[in-house]
Amino acid sequence: MFILVAYDIYTDTKSGQKRLRRVAQACQRVGQRVQKSVFECTLDEVRYAGLVRTLSRIMDKSEDNIRIYCLGEQRPRNILQLGRSPAVNFEDPLIF
C-alpha cells in the first residue's frame, strides 16, 4: 500500500530532538523523504504494522503528532509536484 507519513515532534527539549531523529530514521528505513517531516512509503501489511508499532513506541503521545495517510494499493498518479525537482520513484527501474 502507498502511504504518506507526516509528523510534528516537540523539539524544545533534548529528548524531543532525539525523538525527532528517531522518527525520521524509522521513516527513512521504509520510505523516501519528500519534505522535512513528510515521507512517502510503499509497504506491505507487515511492514506497515511494524512502522506503526515503531513510531508509537518512539513518540510522546502527549506532545507529538504523527499522521499516516493510506492512499491506496499503488502510488497515486494524480500527485501534483510544484517547485524543486520531484523525488525519485523507487518503483520504476533505476538506471545509473
Image: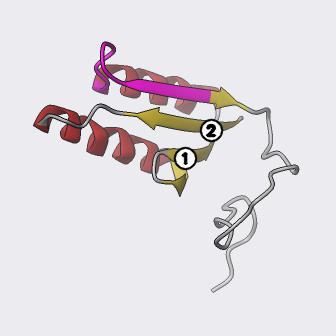
Residue 2: x percent and y percent? 71, 39
Residue in the foreground of this view, choosing between 56 and 47:
56
Are the residues flagged by discs 2 and 1 in contact, CB closer than 8 Å? yes
Q: Residue 39's mark?
A: 1
* Residue at disc 1, secondary structure: strand
Seen at 79% across and 32% down, the residue is: 72
Residue found at x 38% / y 20%: 56
Q: Quadrant of residue 71?
A: top right
For the point 28% across and 20% down, the residue is 60
The three-letter amino acid code for the residue at tag 2 is Leu
Q: Give coordinates of residue 49: x percent, y percent.
A: 52, 23
Span of residues in magenta: 58-68
9 lies left or right of 48: left
Residue sticking out furthest to the left: 14
The image position of residue 11, as x and y in percent, is 24, 37
Determine whether the residue tagged by mark 2 lies in a helix, strand or loop.
strand
**Residue occupying the point 21% across, 41% down:** 17
Label 1 crowd bin: few (<14), some (14–19), many (20+), radius 10 Å: many
Q: Can you name the residue that lies furthest to the top here?
A: 62
Q: Is residue 59 above or below residue 80?
A: above
Counting the numbered discs, the total is: 2
Residue bearing the label numbered 2: 4
Question: Residue 5 colored magenta?
Answer: no
Assess whether residue 64 is covered by the magenta stretch: yes
Residue type at mark 1: give it: Phe
- Can you say which quadrant of the picture contains the C terminus? bottom right
Disc 2/disc 1 C-alpha distance (Å): 6 Å
Q: Nearer the viewer, residue 39 or 14?
A: 14
